Amino acid sequence: MMQRISILTRYFTRTLLFSLSGIFYLLLTLAFWFLLFNPQQQTPDISYYRLMIGGFGAGLAFLVTLGVASRANDAQHYPFLVRLNSRVEFVTAVLLSSLFITLLYQLLLMLLALINGPSLTLGTLLEIPPVWLAPMLFMAVLALHASDFITIGWSRIYVFGLLAILLFGQGLQNESLSNLATSLSRYAINQGWVEISTNLENYANTLSQTDDNAISRLFGFVFWPFEALADGITNGYFTANQSLAPAILLLYATVLFLLAVDLFANKDLEFTE
């Protein structure tokens, strides 16, 4: 199995790197380096270096995975599938090749950014892999669900719709919910639902008197690992809780990858010509 996955990974990697898409990603990397790590200026500090390159790797992983998944969705790959013991091997090869390509461009950016950049110590180098790899893997797996390669029916609508709902909920404020509860209370009293109106009014009063935005925190918990990574990098150190952020992102990625594998294994393949 590992040999088949390795062969497919090398195939997809070589196919994308020596294509117009590969040239585009290379130009994108060089443009990012020149604009945000101008060699004529000193890179401010190591926190900026780690945060910007880590963010670039996560964003590029999404784009690269979309490109590899699009190529894997070609009808010319039907002969590959019939030689595999499981479709899981095919999806795994797509993911691994996407990560490998992203790492190549990120390593190039990392080396270029050292020109008139910060000095990296051994301790700093050891802290970089989990901070960069966890968001990269999460974004790569998320990109699989955005591609026609994995999508079955409305699956991508469900995945990204749930993320949109969580993002919307994260922006909710106690005042907005309090006003909504007050409006519903007035509607209930007009309908003669006294008990419901009283409960809604009490709930609105509780929200208006609460400083802690519990609703926003509840919805925003899913995105806490990203905030924890950004805060830890900016501050220059990670607290005990923040150090768990990469592990949580890996857990998210694992769940999404298992879902992607299940979708691909149970779909009727209709590769594009």
Image (cartoon, rainbow, N blue to C red):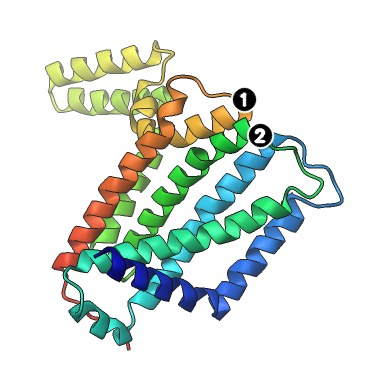
Three-letter amino acid code at disc 1?
Asn
Question: Which badge, 2 or 1, comes first in the chain's sequence?
Answer: 2
Looking at the image, which is closer to me, 10 or 151?
10
Q: Residue furthest front?
A: 3
Question: Where is residue 201 drawn, in percent x and y?
Answer: 26, 16
Q: Could you tell whether 193 is left or right of 111 in the image? A: left
* Residue occupying image coordinates x 19% and y 16%: 199
Looking at the image, which is closer to me, 34 or 130?
130
Q: What element carries label 1?
A: helix
* Residue occupying image coordinates x 48% and y 30%: 228
Q: Which mark is residue 235?
A: 1
Density class for disc 2 (Cα within 10 Å; few <14, some 14-19, many ≥20) is: some
User: Where is 123 relative to 113, above or below?
Assistant: above
Q: Residue furthest right?
A: 40
Q: Could you tell whether 64 is left or right of 2 in the image? A: right
* Residue occupying image coordinates x 15% and y 28%: 191
Quarter of the image for the C terminus: give it: bottom left
Q: Could you tell whether 17 is left or right of 248 in the image? A: right
Question: Where is residue 176 drawn, in percent x and y?
Answer: 40, 28
Q: Residue 141 carries which label?
A: none
User: Where is 84 relative to 193, above or below?
Assistant: below
Q: Are marks 2 and 1 in contact (CB under 8 Å)?
A: yes
* Residue occupying image coordinates x 28% and y 63%: 2
User: Where is 99 relative to 85, above or below?
Assistant: above
Question: Where is residue 109 drawn, in percent x and y?
Answer: 66, 55
Q: Which mark is residue 47?
A: 2
Density class for disc 1 (Cα within 10 Å; few <14, some 14-19, many ≥20) is: few
| Number of numbered labels in the structure image | 2
Answer yes or no: is residue 72 visible.
Answer: yes
Q: How far apart are marks 2 and 1 (CA)?
A: 8 Å
